[in-house]
């Protein structure tokens, strides 16, 4: 009987410890993923729409271009979405690229190249809310001028938020280990 009682206490302590760790992780992620620093929209040299699973951000970024926030809209696409740039968008100078590597770091390297080629000093960056802090961290390693980080409108379910916490945390770890541009 004493063994069963001791095993139960170990299981209970482990469960409580796991719950405390989970709560701490959620609380630590609130200012990074849920309430990141979102910048006030201002005029820029270009709009960069980062790739990802949320392709609603493309029309949002193109819409910002149509509204006159920047003269050029650049979309980061994968090879399956490269045809998106073949669509005509009146009043928008639309350009696309496939990042190499196909990560935020690849997008940052392309931003560096484009900014150097065209003399961009201010770039509006469109991405999802949970990605804003990590994207800013990575892009700032490659772009020394002004980033205006804005959120593309999207609704995330509780399961999607949980996924984003894990995914973005792993991405941060990778960015810290590979910080160069």
Image (spheres, grey):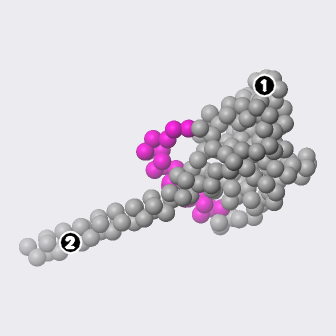
Q: Secondary structure at mark 2?
A: helix
Is residue 124 among what the camera can see? yes
143 shown above or below 60: below
Which residue is located at x 79 percent, y 48 percent? 123
Q: Residues within 10 Å of mark 1 (few under 14, many from 20)?
A: few
Q: Which mark is residue 76?
A: none
Q: Which residue range is magenta in the image?
A: 154-175
Question: Residue 92 placed where, x, y %?
Answer: 81, 30
- Residue ID at (69%, 43%): 126
Which corner quadrant of the image does residue 83 belong to? top right
For residue 9, the mark is: 2
Please say if 93 is above or below 126. Answer: above
In space, the residues marked 2 and 1 are separated at their CA atoms by 64 Å
Position of 11 with respect to 101 (left or right) is left
The question of residue 171 being in magenta is answered with yes
* Image position of 94 with respect to 130: above or below: above
Answer left or right for 88 relative to 7. right
- Residue 78's x, y, as percent? 69, 38
Say which residue label 1 marks.
89
Between disc 2 and disc 1, whose residue precedes? 2
Q: Could you tell me which quadrant the C terminus lies in?
A: bottom right
Q: Nearer the viewer, residue 145 or 131?
A: 145
Q: Residue at x 77, y 41 (%)?
A: 47
Magenta residues, dominant SS class: helix
For residue 40: magenta? no
The N terminus appears in which quarter of the rendering?
A: bottom left
Camera-nearest label, 2 or 1: 1
Q: Residue furthest left?
A: 1
Dot 2, crowdedness within 10 Å: few (<14), some or many (≥20)? few
Percent coordinates x, y for residue 137 in the rendering: 68, 59
Q: Is residue 33 left or right of residue 45?
A: left
């Amino acid at each position: 009987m004493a063994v069963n009682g001791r095993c139960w206490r170990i299981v209970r302590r482990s469960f409580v410890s796991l719950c405390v760790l989970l709560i701490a992780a959620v609380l630590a992620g609130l200012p990074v993923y849920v309430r990141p620093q979102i910048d006030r929209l201002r005029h820029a040299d270009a709009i960069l729409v980062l790739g990802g699973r949320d392709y609603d951000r493309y029309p949002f970024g193109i819409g910002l271009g149509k509204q006159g926030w920047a003269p050029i809209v650049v979309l980061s696409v994968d090879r399956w979405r490269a045809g998106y740039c073949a669509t005509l968008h009146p009043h928008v100078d639309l350009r696309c690229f496939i990042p190499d590597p196909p990560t935020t770091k690849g997008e940052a390297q392309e931003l560096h190249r484009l900014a150097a080629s065209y003399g961009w000093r201010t770039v509006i960056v469109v991405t999802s809310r949970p990605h804003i802090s990590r994207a800013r961290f990575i892009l700032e390693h490659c772009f020394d001028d002004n980033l205006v980080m804005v959120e593309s409108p999207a609704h995330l379910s509780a399961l999607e938020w949980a996924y984003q916490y894990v995914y973005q945390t792993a991405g941060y770890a990778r960015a810290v280990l590979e910080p160069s541009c």
